[in-house]
Amino acid sequence: MNGWFRREARDLPWRRAGFGAWGILVSEVMLQQTPVVRVIPRLEEWLDRWPTPADLASSPPAEAIRAWQGLGYPRRALRLHACAVAITERHDGVVPSDVDELLALPGIGDYTARAVAAFAYGKRHPVVDTNVRRVLARCLDGQGEPAPPNVRRDLAAMESVLPTDEAEARVFNAATMELGAVVCTARSPRCDACPVADACAWRVAGRPPYLGARRAVQKRYEGSDRQVRGILLRELRSAHRPVTGDELGALWPHAEQRDRALAGLVADGLAAAVDDGYALPE
């Protein structure tokens, strides 16, 4: 599969030689719940503005939230800002290479820690995202879909097929992600283009339907508290001044839901109550 990846991999900024650990960390956080096509231009803007963790740490959290507009799940911006502060204060502004030290940073979980260690520093660690889990479920277990995430089980499955050589392991991690993203997709897998089709247990079994446990389906966005939070936060981003309660009240007709969404933004640190209303955190 590594040979296939070297021939067919997409040319993405974070895969290019010289792309540093900070850029890889930022890209991994952005990519968690946002499509690649939306991340690339925003990543370039972000790194132009804040090329080091210290640069981001010296800016107010409000600026990180504003710069995150359009990427979704804005709490990631706050976590990334807190992460930059921690890297600056604890590691002299250098992104650590050790998984445990990465996990100790604010907002950095199992996937991101191992991705940074593997892709930025060439360490041999299994890296498992949604695409990898699907590839492993099909190739190893003969299941059309992966079971709900389980960190210990998922890492053990990837570890079982990861090359022992560090350089090849790094490529294999990236190759498995790429395979799941562009060939072994959730809805329309292209088995005819798959470099490991002959060894895929699911394909050999005739691609049977998945009958196992599934993750809970997220509620629709339209009319949800998430939509209301987005509307309120968009107003706070654009105002550059405190926004009064009356102004926010005009943005959504259902007062109880609006107040709940606003309280959630305050609780998450994405908004702050000030004398004249509400504003982004400074």
Image (cartoon, rainbow, N blue to C red):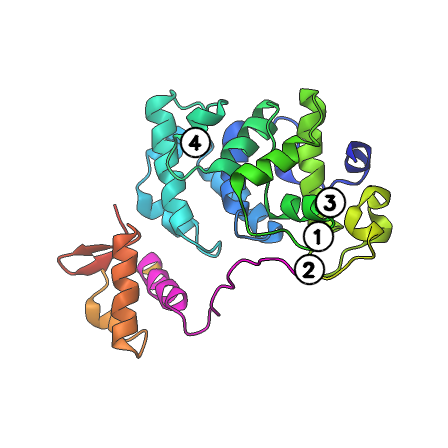
Sequence-earlier tag: 3 or 2 = 3
Dot 1 and dot 4 residues touching (CB under 8 Å): no
How dense is the environment of label 4, judged by Cα within 10 Å: few (below 14), some, or many (20 and up)? some
Disc 4/disc 2 C-alpha distance (Å): 33 Å
The mark found on residue 179 in the picture is: 3
Q: Is residue 44 left or right of residue 101?
A: right
Of residues 184 and 239, the one drawn nearer to the viewer in this rendering: 184
Amino acid type for the residue under numbered disc 4: Leu
For the view shown, which residue lies furthest in the bottom direction?
253
Q: Which residue is mark 1?
A: 143
Q: Is residue 26 left or right of residue 136?
A: left
How dense is the environment of label 3, judged by Cα within 10 Å: few (below 14), some, or many (20 and up)? many
**SS for tag 1?**
loop
Disc 3/disc 4 C-alpha distance (Å): 27 Å
For the question of whether residue 19 can be seen, the reply is no
For the question of whether residue 120 can be seen, the reply is yes
Q: Which residue is mark 4?
A: 103
Reply above or below: 224 against 1. Answer: below
Q: Which residue is mark 2?
A: 210
Reply above or below: 122 against 232. Answer: above
Report the number of numbered marks: 4
Disc 1/disc 4 C-alpha distance (Å): 31 Å
Q: Which residues are magenta?
A: 210-237
Amino acid type for the residue under numbered disc 2: Tyr
Disc 1/disc 2 C-alpha distance (Å): 6 Å
Residue 92 pos. (x, y %)? 38, 20
